[in-house]
Image (cartoon, grey):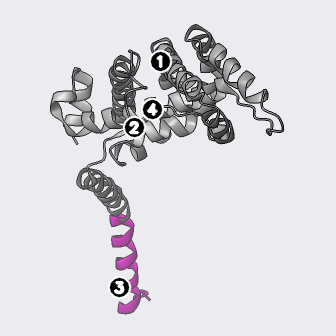
Amino acid sequence: MRHVTPPSRKRSLLIILVLLWLAPVACTAQTDWLKTGRDLLGATAGGPGTNDTGQIGAGLKEALRVGSDTVVGQLGRTDGFNADPAIHIPLPKNFQKVQSTLKTLGMSSLLDDLELRLNRAAEQATPRAKELFWSAIEQMTLDDVMKIYNGPPDAATRYFQGKMSKPLGESMRPIVSDALQQAGAVQAYDRVMGQYRSVPFVPDVKADLVSYVTDQGMNGIFHYLAQEEAAIRQNPVKRTTELLRTVFGAK
């Protein structure tokens, strides 16, 4: 007697066969759909692909190099610091007692001379620090490239400042120390403190001129480097190299 397969069982077998036949197609279609979705998301977000990340990193470094060249030329000349209210280096804050004491004695000129020489030292040290800045720029990693690229106009400068200020400051100290000697700031400091300490019962005051001028000088450089970076991002005229035009012109 011939066995007859019930209709419900036939339908089940047919459904299973159809699903088995469609499975590879569905899998491939899903993969293509996911890939297309990722591509569309990347395109609409305006984000560069992996191959562009290296170029963007190079462009950010180039912006800092070009900017540092401009800033060094601006600050590394006579009155680059001294005549600029934005970055002029005043006497250290702990000198307030020294200032009030010597002014009472009519010796303000000694303080004025010291302040001028601190600024002269920063002006002399700035050009010699350019190579250190360039070397530090090259050490920047690409970990935060997209964050910097899509960040505020001075994002690369602030990232660079936060990451490199400490090692850069250590490298600049010998340069600043030598500049302080050449500018006569050390001798001027000794004259000021000699007069101050000759006054009875005044509290002792000490100042680390090397650290102070190094910090103040770097702050001045970063102040204008941030402005130069912003100008390169926003002003096509400032994009003086092909790499800068390629990277920042596409934003």
Whole-Å distance between the Cαs marked 4 and 3?
A: 89 Å
Considering only order in the chain, which callout, 3 or 4, is on the residue closer to the N terminus?
3
Whole-Å distance between the Cαs marked 3 and 1?
A: 85 Å
Q: Which residues are magenta?
A: 1-22
Circles 2 and 4 in contact, beta carbons < 8 Å: yes
The residue positioned 29% from the left and 56% from the top of the image is 41
Q: In screen coordinates, is 219 left or right of 32?
A: right
Considering only order in the chain, which callout, 4 or 1, is on the residue closer to the N terminus?
4
Considering only order in the chain, which callout, 1 or 3, is on the residue closer to the N terminus?
3
Which mark, residue 88? 4
**Which residue position is annotated with label 1?**
126
Which mark, residue 211? none
Circles 4 and 3 in contact, beta carbons < 8 Å: no
> Which element carries disc 2, helix, strand or loop?
loop
Between circles 2 and 1, the one closer to the viewer is 2
Whole-Å distance between the Cαs marked 2 and 1?
A: 16 Å
The residue positioned 28% from the left and 54% from the top of the image is 45
As drawn, which residue projects farthest toward the left?
Answer: 237
Considering only order in the chain, which callout, 1 or 2, is on the residue closer to the N terminus?
2
Which mark, residue 86? 2
Which mark, residue 11? 3
Circles 3 and 2 in contact, beta carbons < 8 Å: no
Whole-Å distance between the Cαs marked 2 and 4?
A: 6 Å
Query: Callout 4: 10 Å neighbours few (<14), some, many (20+)?
Result: many
Whole-Å distance between the Cαs marked 3 and 2?
A: 85 Å
Q: Is residue 147 above or below residue 11?
A: above
Q: Is residue 176 magenta?
A: no
Q: Quadrant of residue 48?
A: top left
Query: Callout 3: 10 Å neighbours few (<14), some, many (20+)?
Result: few
Q: Is residue 171 shown to the viewer in this render? A: yes
Q: Quadrant of residue 185?
A: top right
As drawn, which residue projects farthest toward the top?
Answer: 182
